[in-house]
């Protein structure tokens, strides 16, 4: 597939407030008033205080019809504007590597974070702009610098997926494979390589972005979806 086509599909999802995250929040009172109590079996979780139910938000799957309806009149666009090319180049100088061409184009043509699987694509630091950290995570360059042994082995951090779990993109392997890595699985750093923490392996960055653009919840693949549909994939280590 061409990167131009993939980037256009990524824009459509990343710029759509009903689809840019794996989980979409809508006000619970609105949801119940429009769809009744039977909608509760489609709610994944709640956000807010149970003491103030009128302020609760309900979590729905990305692209749920109810979410699409709620956000239908909201303007579409990037939550975080694309990064200027000069700032991207400065980031590459800091880490001592060029990012894969597709990832460069995502950051400069789609958005500087604010969308994606799990807790969103990690943003890149920009000169003179304040980008709020995604769910408490540092920016991707800072995280790359914080864990040099992991970065040297796995590559560039793409997404924080909760606790010690991250998606990483290789900067050296052909096709830039993507790994879901759990630091909890790397329990003996003195004797083990970080690869022991890899849970899921994607052969290319293109396939990883393409799966998300198609609406797949990549974090759910932790359970079994990927291996059942494609067969086991072994990292090339």
Image (spheres, rainbow, N blue to C red):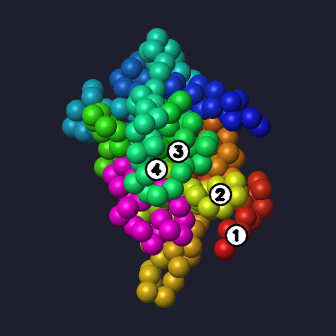
Looking at marks 3 and 2 on the same chain, the residue that comes earlier in the sequence is marked by 3
Indicate which disc, 1 or 3, sits on the residue closer to the N terminus: 3
Q: Which residues are magenta?
A: 138-157
Query: Nearer the N terminus, badge 2 or badge 1?
Result: 2
Q: CA distance from mark 1 to mark 4?
A: 25 Å
Quick one: quadrant of the N terminus? top right
Count of picture labels = 4
Compare residues 79 and 81 and report the one nearer the observer.
81
Left or right of 200 in this view: 75: left
**Distance of label 3 from label 2 (alpha carbons):** 16 Å
Label 4 or label 3, whichever comes before in sequence order? 4
Vertical arrangement, residue 45 with respect to residue 219, above or below: above
Q: Nearer the viewer, mark 3 or mark 2?
A: 2
Q: Earlier in the sequence, mark 1 or mark 4?
A: 4
Q: Which residue is mark 2?
A: 177
Q: Is residue 142 magenta?
A: yes
Measured Cα–Cα span from mark 2 to mark 4:
19 Å
Residues at discs 1 and 4 in contact (Cβ within 8 Å) = no
Q: Residues within 10 Å of mark 1 (few under 14, many from 20)?
A: few
Q: Which residue is mark 1?
A: 236
Mark 2 is surrounded, within 10 Å at the Cα level, by few (under 14), some (14 to 19) or many (20 or more) other residues, namely many
Identify the disc placed on residue 72. none
Query: Is 94 on the left or on the right of 130, as rendered?
Result: right
Tell me the distance, in whole angstroms, between the alpha carbons under discs 2 and 1.
Answer: 9 Å
- The picture places residue 57, in percent across and down from the top left corner, at 35, 32
Q: Which numbered dot is residue 117?
A: 3
Q: Which residue is mark 4?
A: 92
Label 3 Cα neighbours within 10 Å, binned few <14 / some 14-19 / many ≥20:
many
Asked if disc 2 and disc 4 are in contact, CB closer than 8 Å, the reply is no
Q: Is residue 81 magenta?
A: no
| Residue in the picture at 62% in, 42% down | 102
Horizontal side of 234 relative to 60 (left or right) equals: right
């Amino acid at each position: 597939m061409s990167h131009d086509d993939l980037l256009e599909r990524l824009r459509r999802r990343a710029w759509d407030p009903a689809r840019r995250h794996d989980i979409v929040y809508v006000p619970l009172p609105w949801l119940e008033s429009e769809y009744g109590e039977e909608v509760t079996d489609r709610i994944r979780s709640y956000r807010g205080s149970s003491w103030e139910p009128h302020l609760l938000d309900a979590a729905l799957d990305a692209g749920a019809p109810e979410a699409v309806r709620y956000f239908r009149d909201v303007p579409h666009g990037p939550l975080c504007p694309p990064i200027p090319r000069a700032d991207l180049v400065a980031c590459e100088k800091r880490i001592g590597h060029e990012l894969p061409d597709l990832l460069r184009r995502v950051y400069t043509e789609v958005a500087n974070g604010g969308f994606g699987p799990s807790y969103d694509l990690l943003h890149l630091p920009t000169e003179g702009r304040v980008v709020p950290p995604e769910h408490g995570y540092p920016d991707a360059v800072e995280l790359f610098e914080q864990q040099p042994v992991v970065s040297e082995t796995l590559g560039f951090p793409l997404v924080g997926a909760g606790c010690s779990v991250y998606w990483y993109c290789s900067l050296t392997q052909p096709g830039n494979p993507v790994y879901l890595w759990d630091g909890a699985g790397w329990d003996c750093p003195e004797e083990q390589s970080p690869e022991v923490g890899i849970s899921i392996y994607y052969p290319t960055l293109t396939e990883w972005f393409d799966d998300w653009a198609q609406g797949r919840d990549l974090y759910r693949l932790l359970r079994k979806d990927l291996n059942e549909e494609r067969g086991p994939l072994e990292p090339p280590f």
